[in-house]
Image (tube, rainbow, N blue to C red):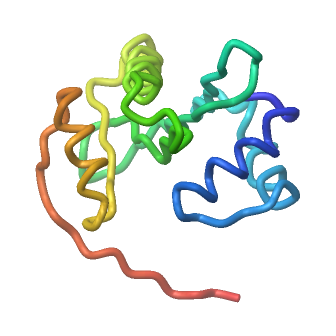
């Protein structure tokens, strides 16, 4: 991911259902782009325009062994089911594998049935269901 991609990344993120503008996306992504515990990868078309992105993060906790987590994955709605998502996921998995991380984890909103089918097709298995709680701090 490059800073010049962030306008398109914001557009794709909005397609995913998380509206964001380029300014906010720049504020979010810039500190992560060069961190070794984060993978921010962009798929592009023949004209070098972003068509999808994946964000994978190394996740270490006391209660479970180390994992890599797909924090986000989106493909432009015009080209979904074209293999771009599978390619991005495979690249994320390879990044984790090369770092010695034993497993990948992804969380997906309960209403995203198409995404669930995608993850199952590429080898992910549902291991549990959870509730997510949030408390605003500011």
Q: Quadrant of residue 86?
A: top left
Quadrant in which the C terminus appears:
bottom right
19 on left or right of 78: right
Quadrant in which the N terminus appears:
top right
- Can you name the residue that lies furthest to the front here? 78
| Percent x, y of residue 94 | 41, 14
39 on left or right of 116: right
Name the residue rendered at 58%, 55% in the picture.
15
Q: Quadrant of residue 89?
A: top left
Name the residue rendered at 31%, 33% in the picture.
104
66 on left or right of 75: left
Name the residue rendered at 85%, 35% in the picture.
3
**Of the pair 93 and 99, the residue shown nearer to us:** 93
**Of the pair 8 and 62, the residue shown nearer to us:** 8
The count of marks equals: 0
Q: Quadrant of residue 9?
A: top right
| Percent x, y of residue 21 | 80, 61
Q: Is residue 48 above or below residue 53?
A: above
| Percent x, y of residue 134 | 46, 82
Q: Is residue 99 above or below residue 53?
A: above
Q: Is residue 104 above or below residue 136?
A: above
| Percent x, y of residue 122 | 23, 27
């Amino acid at each position: 991911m490059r800073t010049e991609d962030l306008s398109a990344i914001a557009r794709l993120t909005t397609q995913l259902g998380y509206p964001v503008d380029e300014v906010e996306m720049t504020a979010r992504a810039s500190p992560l782009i060069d961190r070794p515990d984060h993978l921010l990868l962009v798929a592009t078309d023949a004209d070098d325009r972003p068509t999808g992105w994946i964000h994978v993060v190394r996740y270490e906790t006391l209660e479970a062994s180390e994992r890599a987590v797909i924090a986000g994955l989106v493909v432009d709605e015009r080209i979904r089911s074209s293999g771009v998502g599978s390619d991005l996921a495979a690249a994320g998995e390879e990044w984790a594998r090369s770092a010695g991380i034993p497993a990948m984890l992804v969380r997906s909103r309960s209403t995203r049935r198409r995404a669930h089918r995608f993850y199952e097709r590429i080898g992910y298995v549902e291991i549990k269901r959870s509730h997510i709680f949030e408390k605003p701090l500011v």
